Amino acid sequence: MRRPGPITPPPPSARRAPVRAVVALGSNLGDRAQIVADARDALAKLPLTTDVTMAEPIESVALTLEGLDDSKPSYLNTVALVTTTLAPSMLLAHLHGIEKEHGRERIVRWGDRTLDLDLIAYGDVQSDDPHLLLPHPRAAERDFVLAPWLTLDADAELVGYGRVADLLAGLRGEA
């Protein structure tokens, strides 16, 4: 019987370089502020992830498949910037795990939720894989994503779309 040897890490040249990812957080059920804070803490505990910075949360009207719906509970939304060496698919899997830990149930598309975590961007990676769309296909249309992101990084760019400041100005009719 062969005994396993010590595990040796890959050489530095084979390791993934750190990437800055943008994660959107939202909650419209339960103690929204506490859920968002707990999610931030969970992001900070992810393996191979450092430097988690979160913008101040903002209130937004619930967005459903039919459009804005002020009869639904309002959302508390924010964005976190994380530095990670996790592959984008692994980061997304961890985000889904954090959602599940906070009671997220995927019953109604764009329905009410205790926690929603979206991977908005992963460095300058672009992917049209249906399981990993990057950047997030509707991020450029979401004030509640762009505004908090801009507070964290005034020079932010959404790959394939342009400067976040310009996208936000366009949404607000300021262009």
Image (cartoon, rainbow, N blue to C red):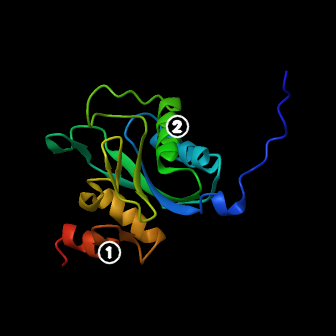
Residue positioned 16% across, 72% down in the render: 173
Mark 2 surroundings within 10 Å by alpha-carbon count, few (fewer than 14), some (14 through 19), many (20 or more) = many
Quadrant location of the N terminus? top right
Helix, strand or loop for disc 2: helix
Could you tell whether 117 is left or right of 72 in the image?
right
Q: Give the answer, above or below, for where 128 lies relative to 100.
A: below
Vertical arrangement, residue 173 with respect to residue 105, above or below: below
Q: Quadrant of the C terminus?
A: bottom left
Residue type (three-letter) at the residue carrying disc 1:
Ala
Relative height, residue 96 to residue 164 (above, below): above
Amino acid beneath label 2: Ile
In the image, 26 versus 16, the foreground residue is 16
On residue 175, the disc is none
Element under disc 1: helix
Q: Are marks 2 and 1 in contact (CB under 8 Å)?
A: no
| Residue 46 position within the rendered picture, expressed as x and y whole percent measured from the top left | 62, 46
Residue 74 in the image, given as x and y percentages of width and height:
31, 44
- Residue drawn at x 30%, y 39% is 73
- Residue most toward the front? 1
Residue assigned mark 2: 98
Judge the density around disc 1: few (<14), some (14-19), many (≥20) Cα neighbours within 10 Å. Answer: many
Q: Quadrant of residue 115?
A: top left
Identity of the residue drawn at 51% across and 34% down: 97
16 to the left or right of 110: right
| Residue 67, horizontal then vertical, whole percent | 16, 45
Can residue 57 be seen by looking at this rendering?
A: no
The circle drawn on residue 165 is 1
- Tell me which numbered mark, 2 or 1, is placed earlier along the sequence: 2
Q: Quadrant of residue 125?
A: bottom left
Name the residue: 13% across, 40% down: 66
Could you tell me residue 136's position as x and y percent? Answer: 33, 53
**Between 160 and 61, the one nearer to me in the picture:** 160
